[in-house]
Amino acid sequence: MQDSKVIIALDFSDEKKVMQLCERLDCSKCKLKVGKQLFTKYGPALVDKLQSKGFKIFLDLKFHDIPTTVYKASVEAYKLGVWMLNVHALGGSEMMSAALQARNDVNKESKLIAVSILTSHTNANLAHFGIERREDFAKILARKADDAGLDGIVCSPSDIESIGITKESFMYVTPGIRLGSNKDDHNRTFTPKQAYDLGADYIVVGRPISESNEPLLVLDKILSSFN
């Protein structure tokens, strides 16, 4: 089975809507992202339900704490059997290594990636922290994640070229994907094909699929655009 490049963000606050969407999708064509809102409300039980339907889960909790706390939290996350987990690269090398150790202790087949710069950040608001260019800081954080042995980075498609890590084992996971001109919460958005052409290994798509009357049709169109 070919590995789908599309991760659907479950931007819902209601489990019923999540399950209704899943009934209209094909688990062989996509993966699902469970974020803070859903996980805080429904917890591990929702992850279990989605995995029982055949979906691979990206648990998007962006852990950022002292290494010991992140290790313990990551152990519990990986015990759920998730396909992928993320942490904030800003937590530092020791923290990322602790999360990696948790992954290796529980399930070496699972993935661990780090978040670099949120797609909502601009050069203007990063300047308050003394950062002149988001691309430069994204590169630093991505290199730290790679040095720590993580599987990849979450970044904007526009950051991939400047990050410049080209080894095949390093994954670029890119949010901020839209089919039209609506940016929603992101400073800059890209179409699926644009992200793919810039080097994305996985794209995270939310509302363009989850709010569609024909989510599987939209998903098929996105997958076709990669060819």
Image (cartoon, rainbow, N blue to C red):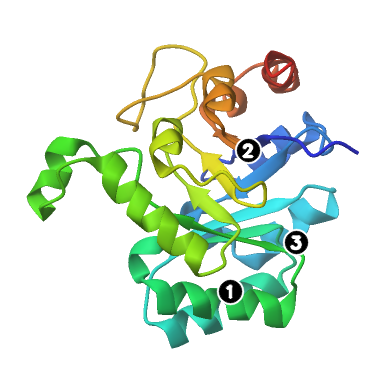
**Which amino acid is tagged 2?**
Asp
Label 3 close to label 1 by CB (< 8 Å): no
Residue at 51% of width from left, 80% of height from top? 98
Query: In the picture, which quadrant includes the N terminus?
Result: top right
Give the answer, above or below, for where 80 lies relative to 23.
below
Query: Which dot marks residue 165?
Result: none
**Which amino acid is tagged 3?**
Asp
**Which amino acid is tagged 1?**
Leu
Q: Nearer the viewer, residue 128 or 10?
A: 128
Residue at 74% of width from left, 71% of height from top? 108
Question: Mark 2 = which residue?
Answer: 201
Check disc 1 and report its element: helix, strand or loop: helix
Check disc 3 and report its element: helix, strand or loop: helix
| Among numbered discs 3 and 2, the one appearing first in the sequence | 3
| Among numbered discs 2 and 1, the one appearing first in the sequence | 1
Query: In the picture, which quadrant includes the C terminus?
Result: top right
Q: Residues within 10 Å of mark 2 (few under 14, many from 20)?
A: some
Q: Is residue 154 left or right of residue 127?
A: right
Question: Mark 1 = which residue?
Answer: 100
Question: Mark 3 = which residue?
Answer: 48
Give the answer, above or below, for where 139 lies relative to 114.
above
